[in-house]
Amino acid sequence: MERKTLISAFVEQIIAKTDFSQLDQIYLYNRILNLVDGVDKTGDYTDKSLIELADLLVNLGDTERTAGQKELLKTELLNFLVPAPSKVNQIFWNKYQQQGVNSALKYLYQLNQASNYIKTAEISKNKYFRYQSKYGELEITINLSKPEKDPRDIARLQKLAPTSYPQCQLCFTNEGYQGRIGYPARSNHRIIRFDLLNETWGLQYSPYAYFNEHCIFVDQKHQLMKIDRLTFRRLLTILDIFPAYFVGSNADLPIVGGSILSHEHFQGGRHEFSMDQAKIRQKITFTDFAHVKAGIVDWPMSVIRLSGKNKEELVELATKILNSWKNYSDEKVAVIAASDHQPHHTITPIARKRGAEYELDLVLRDNHCTKEFPAGVFHPHPDVQNIKQENIGLIEVMGLAILPPRLQRELAEVEKYLLHQPNQIAEKHLHWTEKILQQYDGKITAENVTSIVKQALGATFVRVLEDAGVFKNDSVGQKAFNRFVDYVNE
Ligand SMILES: [Zn+2]
């Protein structure tokens, strides 16, 4: 057993893993001693990882630190591992040039994991399973990675003066930002700059990834998300730079868009979604675009898939479809382009490379609301909102459900109810649970109850996606889909 001080053990690993050298040992020790309020502790730290040592360090000294304060400090400590942004960019692009794109991405990804920018331990807490549907195998996750808020942090937050810096969580000004109570710690955050059609964009990973190498492409300028011709050009150009990743954009209207509409950005990553594997249900042709293959995808939402080798042709046709959709109403199937001068129609686009071909999925979206469906006609309907009431964004469109953490607790009560045990089932789950009881009448046991609830969750996610589909998968809906295709060709 080798005894040393906690700070010395941390400094030793920093020196081993960075450009710092032995000569920096005293300097690093003193900088860290200051951060942990002048306290150090002797022990055996031989088997501890750098992140584990950081966890021990944040518990030294001031024992009154809140969860939020510990997170800020931990991030600041782990920032000693990460080179300056200019250096990270230099290493990334050198690797890109000399060893190829995947080697560069691997460098950034591993650096982000080692510095705990990507929250690997927290992400592993998510519940994940697959559900076999008629559209293929869907993925379901219950998102448990974001820590519960410390009540002391909530109390402190109320006393803080409001601030508008950084302007939003996607702005480049987050790079190296200390963070504060109620705002993420970003000391260890680094952004890879790249040229996208003569504008500067950034590449960064998502700290709470929903799938492998979940990344975000961010416009350097803080400006509103907007789906138009430029979006399609940008998506396909990103595929030229990072061909192993898919890239897609959330829609640019509320209800059918993502959580941040104020800053232009895309999401991407190295993951094959269920929608990627979905087949073409019906081939279609577009006038003047003989070289572009097109079809309606066999999917619960309404998707037109375009593919071809010529980027400009795909961009032209996608723009034509988007502009047609923006003006298109079909009241027989409750599709309404605009009301009260508010536009309702937009597209969620997703692009991927298949060999030499580009593939572009255009998911038609409509965000209008009615008295019957105040949250949105093409949004999860009230009878499934006990499971999902949030927006159906890009990732869910592709068949990966991100269900809220509250479900973990609530479904435990649902299971007790199904087993006729004393329970505190929430009112909103009663109808949904009664339907499961009817379906599995008398066959539910302590052994199979969890898997029965998973099946019900999967089936409900299919319903959620079908609710979000503008042209339903029945003969009325598919005829309406074809009327829209005809309209594009007029
Ligand atoms: Zn911003």
Image (tube, grey):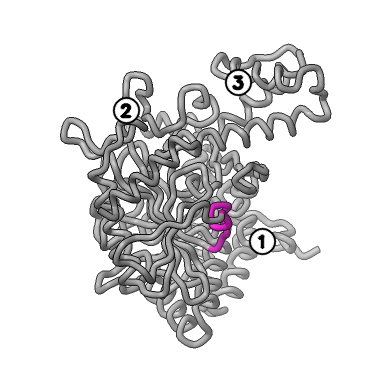
Residue wearing tag 3: 432
Q: How far apart in space, not on screen, are marks 3 and 2 (Cα)?
A: 24 Å
Q: Which residues are magenta?
A: 270-278
Side of 374 where 2 appears, left or right: right
Give the residue type at disc 3. Trp
Give the residue type at disc 1. Ser
State the image coordinates of residue 268 (x, y, percent, origin top left): 46, 60
Q: Give the quarter of the image for residue 93.
A: bottom left
Q: Residues within 10 Å of mark 3 (few under 14, many from 20)?
A: some
Label 3 beta carbon less than 8 Å to ligand 1: no
Side of 381 where 460 appears, left or right: right
Q: Is residue 293 magenta?
A: no
Among numbered discs 1 and 3, the one appearing first in the sequence:
1
Q: Report the quarter where the N terminus lies.
A: bottom right
Pointers 3 and 2 in contact (CB under 8 A)?
no
Q: Mark 1, mark 3: which one is toward the viewer? A: 3
In the rendered image, the residue lying farthest to the left is: 341
In the rendered image, the residue lying farthest to the bottom is: 98
Residue wearing tag 2: 369
Query: Considering depth in this image, is 220 or 420 the residue closer to the camera?
Result: 420
Q: How far apart in space, not on screen, are marks 2 and 1 (Cα)?
A: 52 Å
Residue wearing tag 1: 49
Residue at 66% x, 42% y is 131
Pointers 1 and 3 in contact (CB under 8 A)?
no
Among numbered discs 2 and 1, the one appearing first in the sequence:
1
Give the residue type at disc 2. Cys
State the image coordinates of residue 434 (x, y, percent, origin top left): 65, 16
At mark 1, the secondary structure is loop
Q: How far apart in space, not on screen, are marks 1 and 3 (Cα)?
A: 45 Å
Residue at 69% x, 14% y is 423
Q: Is residue 275 magenta?
A: yes
